[in-house]
Amino acid sequence: MKKTILIAEDDVNVADGLGQYLKKKDYEVIVAYDGLSALEIAKKEDINLLLTDLLLSKLYGLDLIREIKKEKPDIQFIMMTAFGDIELAVQAMKEGAYDFLTKPLDLRKLGILIEKALEVQVLSLRNRQLQQTLEANYTFSNVIGRSSLMKKVFEIVRQVSPRRSNVLIYGESGTGKELIANAIHYNSPRASMPFIKVNCGALSEGVLESELFGHERGAFTGAVSKRKGRFELAHGGTIFLDEVSEMSPATQVKLLRVLQEGEFERVGGDKTLKVDIRVIAATNKDLWTAVKAGKFREDLFYRLNVVKIDLPPLRERKEDIPFLVTHFIEKFNKKHDLAIQGINHKALDLLSLYDWPGNVRELENCIESAMLSTNGNYILPVNLPAYVKTPSRNEKNIVIQIGTPLAEIERLVYKKTLEETKGNKTKAARLLGVGVRTVHRKALEYGL
């Protein structure tokens, strides 16, 4: 696709001559003979580069750049100026112009400048698209939940995101700790800076130390070149330390120094490096229990635990399941080019009865699997995995269909409770909040 160049030049001969030259270079060219006309064209047309004279009629060249930048910041600018106006041309570069040329123009040099400026524009657009993709995937709105428990989590995230404080996220595997970390970073003043993630539990002690702090050439066998660590790469941004409880005592000491002093040395190096980072850590274990057991440093715990976020397991917020299911259906419709419209109410009831030991991640996998086996427009009970449709014998749930008589519900409650207590009627009475004689009587009545 051809690039479009707008020429803003009030000398008609110069403007038309440049237009002819650039058309031969295979560019689309639009010519404006004054500043106001150039501004109107730039607002309406898809322009890649503006080649403008400094001393334009009706709208000064610098003002033209400022006005266009407000609405279309990715357009590149090259300024043309007389020799005596170089100071103004330098000012134009401060305003956002890519470069400037003095008249009479060197067309060969102009051609090179245009190519380079357009390359910069391509990179700028790619960066903007990448940022939009990141925001679409990781912003606060992407964390699904309307339960009271999740509303509390959201409130903490809103409060802590603009701050510099470190955050410790607790939650079982699959509850979405990384999503919360994403939301905090991409809603913070550091959103445009790096967001580096490290799974501390997936790396051995030596490898983790090198990953975090980097290493110098020859620091150990296989270190054939110098390598920057994750802390260096995260400078100015955020680092997410998942499964931080798995970090060795030696690495904990080095992490503590980074949190206290903002400095460290690469493995095998003696040069002290300074970094400005925010740390978000996550764990599925009770860190304070690890502290009391001597497995985690108490001073490091306090440095990490400035703000604590507890993510509830899915079994404690089942009212969020319908919203999560809707979200996953939309997601996998796009991924697999499907057109599933929703989920049958009986299938949704089964999802709500299941306890989801794998949490949101397990539900996501379940919905993807169900959608791939669905022939119609809706997910049906038959499309769900067997473990969801048939609760295990150990589950402490009773499945009751709508319309079941109360006497039958009572029979099921007594039957299930006596099974759980292995026939111990005293325990059953305590669980049900009734007398032991009542349990004996109901067991006889229902033939239990």
Image (cartoon, rainbow, N blue to C red):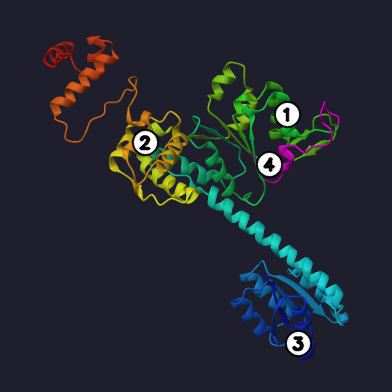
The mark found on residue 168 in the picture is none
Kindly indicate whether the residue at mark 1 contacts the one at mark 3 (C-beta within 8 angstroms).
no
Residue at 24% x, 14% y is: 418
**Mark whose residue sits in front, 1 or 2:** 2
Kindly indicate whether the residue at mark 2 contacts the one at mark 4 (C-beta within 8 angstroms).
no
Asked which secondary structure carries label 4, the reply is loop
| Residue identified by numbered label 2 | 384
Residue type at numbered disc 4: Ile
Other residues around mark 2 within 10 Å, as few (<14) / some (14–19) / many (≥20): many
- Give percent across and percent down for residue 67: 65, 75
| Residue identified by numbered label 1 | 209
Residue type at numbered disc 2: Leu
**Mark whose residue sits in front, 3 or 4:** 3
| Distance between the alpha carbons at the discs numbered 1 and 4 | 17 Å
| Distance between the alpha carbons at the discs numbered 3 and 4 | 53 Å
Residue type at numbered disc 1: Glu
**Among the 4 quarters of the image, the one containing residue 31:** bottom right
Q: Which numbered disc, 3 or 1, marks the residue that appears first in the sequence?
A: 3
| Residue identified by numbered label 4 | 277
Kindly indicate whether the residue at mark 4 contacts the one at mark 3 (C-beta within 8 angstroms).
no
| Residue identified by numbered label 3 | 16
Looking at the figure, which quarter contains the N terminus?
A: bottom right
Q: Which numbered disc, 1 or 2, marks the residue that appears first in the sequence?
A: 1
